């Protein structure tokens, strides 16, 4: 039995953090589903920029949609409109591949994800509007809209959940950012219960892990290297399990609500000297999701090991984190810095994505 199947049978969902049109047309994604127990997929602007700019698979649709966008007077938003049409075409096909999983799990699993424009990260009203528009346009129940867990994003998450839109909260880095996102989710559900609406609106909260270790790689002694993300993850997992046991959540569960699952993101190993399955093995935990690059997924299937599951109490995470604080690392400040840098990185990727589409439109139109 492959390690991927073992992990799946222990109760963790394995998602792949990538999408390209060839992955769909050549059967790669279907192979991951059939052979590697993959039950969902995530995407972001950087992933799509590489996919669209990396070959000619999208050129014909860029030309077709781009002409329509110009004729429709889209103006400065033409490239953004083209992107969302390209992304939705891929994600509808991917969502259809996961439709059986979605049905079998009664809507818990089998999701794909599309991110709102990163430029809206500080604009709650515009994020709410775009999230609703994109989800309606997708016409797939198993499509999450990704909203960053920034202060403005937190407001948008609550309103979007209240509106019944499935949300993948992105750009979370520690337990406090996670708890803020979870609070927004529960507020949205509580408002639905009070309004007599269906309390089932699916959501995941995505905590980015490997960036912690990259950030401190040159600032801590060798014995602490590649240990910060695991410590942060242990603390976040404890917060997650405590929330699931809380009176507040139990009241909502009694109304028929479904829990927002914790999702481990950024789980590809960045250090070439570390195990390429480090974060998959470390974050093995039931009723969570681990979304991983396709190379990490294949590596784990080939030589990964399913070891001990995460300790719901956090294990030794607090002792580990104290060591990092003793080495001069301000964990709260670093969490905020990582979220700010993540937001800036997504802005940059978004700009590169739109430039790639503009360049493609110039090529295909000529």
Image: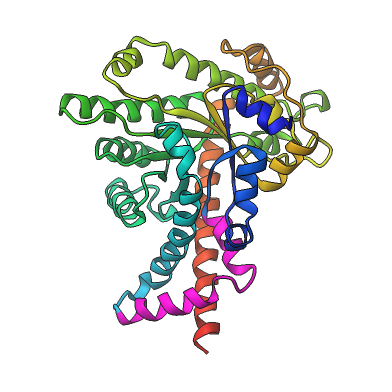
Task: Look at the image and say whether residue 54 sits in the magenta stretch.
Answer: yes
Which residue in the rendered view is the most extreme toward the left?
Answer: 195
Most common SS among magenta residues: helix
Query: Where residue 190 sits: x, y (%)?
Result: 25, 24
Quadrant of the rendered image containing residue 208: top right
- Residue 128 left/right relative to 97: left
Task: Tell me which residue sits at (29%, 50%) in the image.
Answer: 132
Q: Nearer the viewer, residue 203 or 184?
A: 203
Task: Tell me which residue sits at (83%, 27%) in the image.
Answer: 222
Query: Where residue 342 sits: x, y (%)?
Result: 54, 45
Task: Look at the image and give the residue range highlighted in magenta.
Answer: 45-71
In this picture, is 325 found above or below 339?
above
Query: Where residue 319 sits: x, y (%)?
Result: 67, 12
Task: Tell me which residue sits at (34%, 13%) in the image.
Answer: 250
- Residue 9 left/right relative to 171: right
Q: Nearer the viewer, residue 61 or 194?
A: 61
Query: Where residue 79 sits: x, y (%)?
Result: 43, 70
User: In the picture, which quadrant includes the N terminus?
Assistant: top right
């Amino acid at each position: 039995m492959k390690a991927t199947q073992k992990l799946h049978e222990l109760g963790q969902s394995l998602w792949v953090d990538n999408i390209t049109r060839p992955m769909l047309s050549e059967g790669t994604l279907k192979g991951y589903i059939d052979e590697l127990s993959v039950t969902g997929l995530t995407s972001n602007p950087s992933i799509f920029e590489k996919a669209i700019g990396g070959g000619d698979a999208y050129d014909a649709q860029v030309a077709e949609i781009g002409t329509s966008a110009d004729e429709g007077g889209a103006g400065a938003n033409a490239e953004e409109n083209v992107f969302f049409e390209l992304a939705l075409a891929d994600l509808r096909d991917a969502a259809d591949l996961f439709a059986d999983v979605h049905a079998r799990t009664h809507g818990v699993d089998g999701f794909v994800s599309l991110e709102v424009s990163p430029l809206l990260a500080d604009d709650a009203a515009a994020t709410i509007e775009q999230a609703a528009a994109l989800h309606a346009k997708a016409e797939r129940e198993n499509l999450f809209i990704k909203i960053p867990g920034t202060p403005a994003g937190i407001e948008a998450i609550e309103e979007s959940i209240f509106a019944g839109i499935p949300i993948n909260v992105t750009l979370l880095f520690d337990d406090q950012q996670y708890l803020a996102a979870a609070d927004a989710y529960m507020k949205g559900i509580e408002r639905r219960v009070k309004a007599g609406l269906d309390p089932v609106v699916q959501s995941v909260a995505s905590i980015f892990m490997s960036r912690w270790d990259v950030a401190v790689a040159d600032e801590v002694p060798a014995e602490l290297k590649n240990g910060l993300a695991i410590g942060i993850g242990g603390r976040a997992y404890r917060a997650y399990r405590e929330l699931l046991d809380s009176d507040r959540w139990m009241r909502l569960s009694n109304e028929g609500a479904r829990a927002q699952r914790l999702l481990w993101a950024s789980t590809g190993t960045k250090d070439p000297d570390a195990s390429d399955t480090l974060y998959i093995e470390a974050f093995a935990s039931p009723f969570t999701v681990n979304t991983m690059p396709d190379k990490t997924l294949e590596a784990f299937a080939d030589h990964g090991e399913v070891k001990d599951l995460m300790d719901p109490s956090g294990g030794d995470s607090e002792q580990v984190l104290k060591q990092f604080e003793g080495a001069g690392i301000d964990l709260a400040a670093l969490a905020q810095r990582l979220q700010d840098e993540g937001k800036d990185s997504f802005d940059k990727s978004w700009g590169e994505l739109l430039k790639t589409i503009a360049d493609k439109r110039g090529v295909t139109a000529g």
